[in-house]
Image (cartoon, grey):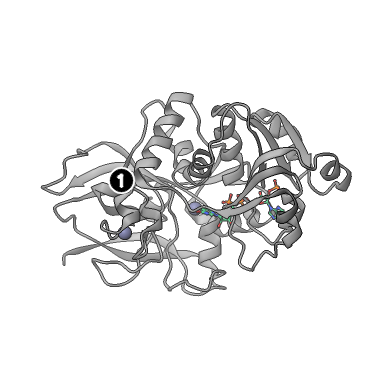
């Protein structure tokens, strides 16, 4: 298979810094488009993967799955896109397309395992897939999204993971007017959860460990804020919420948050810390509560989310960085020192 070489940023070991390296992309095949990457968001999953916190990283690893760019080449059978289109790629670049989940448009739950944008077996080149911290990417058109024209491209990039990962469970659990929703962990995912739940009409409660986010939460659209480190506030708000979306990246006590749910309430976990989170039986049993998980969203739903954001003028609050500053950005991410998503201006890699 014909390939070409591009510049990328990635790492060679769990404790190694990310550095510039060369990687290969396939030349477009009949259904592929080639995308010149303009912006790439920095997800906490990039950091978990770069440092092998989920014990599944294959090195070299090039992270990045919040990609916005322009089409520079199309294969001869491509029908959905043309040269120059502003497009996006999220967390998946392929799946089996045949299993029940793929047939249902839920490719993220592909029974054969979806092909992640990075750190998945590459069906074309044999190695692992390489993500968006790179100059260009080649993707089958069926896994490419259209970016609404009214949205700022840099601030749209985080919608491709943080946006869809919060939109999908909010929709699945029927969040709407009259529902009281709690969002735990106001980072990249959480701040999108607040904006999206609000746009869906819900009453939105921010639950944060960071005192400096209390004021900001209202600006993001929250109706109420709970500082979770304050035991009195947590007690006063017990049994008050219908649904909680947990977006926390580190170890935390799930039981404290389950206690905020009303009878028949649901807590959905999207945050993915490396170790188990023990749930006490009596956090669930006495009020018939449920505890569930959710992973990103399917391709159809990702387009639906982008169009919803276009209609409601929703984008991420971002801080633009150069690729050369990625290692410092990871350290700041660990300290919760970002409002609320780093986005890499990929021009910094090209020049
Ligand atoms: P992020 O920007 O770093 O935000 C994480 C937030 O968690 C922090 O801002 C902080 O919010 C809160 N937090 C951190 N440490 C905490 C602790 N010890 N106790 C309680 N809260 C704490 O991360 P992100 O990019 O939004 O990602 C969040 C998690 O979701 C990561 O684990 C990521 O891998 C995962 N993820 C999952 C999916 C999926 O499909 N399920 C998709 C993407 C990402 P406060 O300051 O408000 O407390
Ligand atoms: Zn992500
Ligand atoms: Zn499948």
Report if residue 69 is visible in the image. yes
SS at badge 1: loop
Relative side of 333 to 104, left or right = right
Which residue is rendered at x = 62% and y = 62% of the image?
A: 273
Report if residue 246 is visible in the image. no
Q: Quadrant of residue 85?
A: top left
Which residue is rendered at x = 35% and y = 46% of the image?
A: 299
Q: Quadrant of residue 108?
A: bottom left
Q: Quadrant of residue 175?
A: top right
Residue neighbourhood size for the residue with mark 1, other residues' Cα within 10 Å, grouped as few (<14), some (14–19), many (≥20): many
Name the residue nearer the viewer: 311 or 108.
108
Tell which residue pokes out farthest to the left in this image. Answer: 76
Residue under circle 1? 144
Some atom of ligand 2 lies within 8 Å of the CB belonging to the residue at label 1: no
Which percent across, then down, holds residue 318?
A: 55, 39
Relative side of 273 to 287, left or right = left
Relative side of 31 to 189, left or right = left
Which residue is rendered at x = 44% and y = 44% of the image?
A: 160
């Amino acid at each position: 298979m014909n390939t070409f070489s591009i510049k990328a940023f990635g790492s060679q070991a769990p404790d190694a810094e990310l550095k510039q390296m060369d990687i290969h992309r396939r030349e477009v095949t009949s259904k592929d488009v080639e995308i010149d990457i303009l912006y790439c968001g920095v997800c906490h999953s990039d950091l978990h993967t770069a440092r092998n916190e989920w014990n599944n990283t294959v090195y070299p690893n090039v992270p990045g799955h919040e990609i916005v760019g322009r089409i520079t080449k199309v294969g001869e059978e491509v029908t959905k896109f043309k040269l120059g289109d502003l497009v996006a790629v999220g967390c998946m670049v392929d799946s089996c397309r045949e299993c029940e989940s793929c047939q249902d448009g839920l490719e993220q739950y592909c029974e054969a395992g979806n092909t992640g944008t990075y750190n998945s077996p590459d069906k074309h080149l044999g190695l692992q897939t390489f993500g968006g911290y790179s100059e260009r990417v080649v993707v089958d058109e069926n896994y490419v999204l259209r970016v609404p024209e009214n949205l700022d491209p840099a601030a749209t990039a985080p919608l491709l993971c943080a946006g869809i990962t919060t939109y999908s469970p909010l929709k699945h659990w029927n969040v709407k007017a009259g529902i009281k929703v709690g969002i735990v962990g106001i980072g990249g995912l959480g701040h999108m959860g607040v904006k999206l739940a609000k746009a869906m009409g819900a009453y939105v409660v921010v639950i944060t460990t960071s005192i400096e986010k209390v004021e900001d939460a209202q600006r993001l659209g929250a109706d109420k804020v709970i500082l979770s480190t304050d035991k009195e506030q947590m007690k006063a708000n017990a049994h008050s919420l219908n649904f909680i979306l947990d977006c926390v990246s580190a170890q935390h006590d799930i039981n404290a948050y389950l206690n905020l749910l009303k009878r028949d309430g649901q807590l959905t976990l999207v945050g993915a810390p490396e170790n188990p989170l023990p749930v006490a039986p009596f956090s669930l049993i006495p009020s018939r509560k449920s505890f569930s998980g959710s992973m990103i969203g399917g391709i159809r739903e990702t387009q639906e989310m982008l169009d919803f954001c276009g209609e409601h003028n929703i984008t991420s609050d971002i801080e633009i960085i150069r690729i050369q500053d990625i290692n410092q950005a990871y350290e700041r991410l660990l300290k919760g020192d970002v409002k609320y998503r780093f986005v890499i201006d990929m021009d910094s890699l090209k020049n």
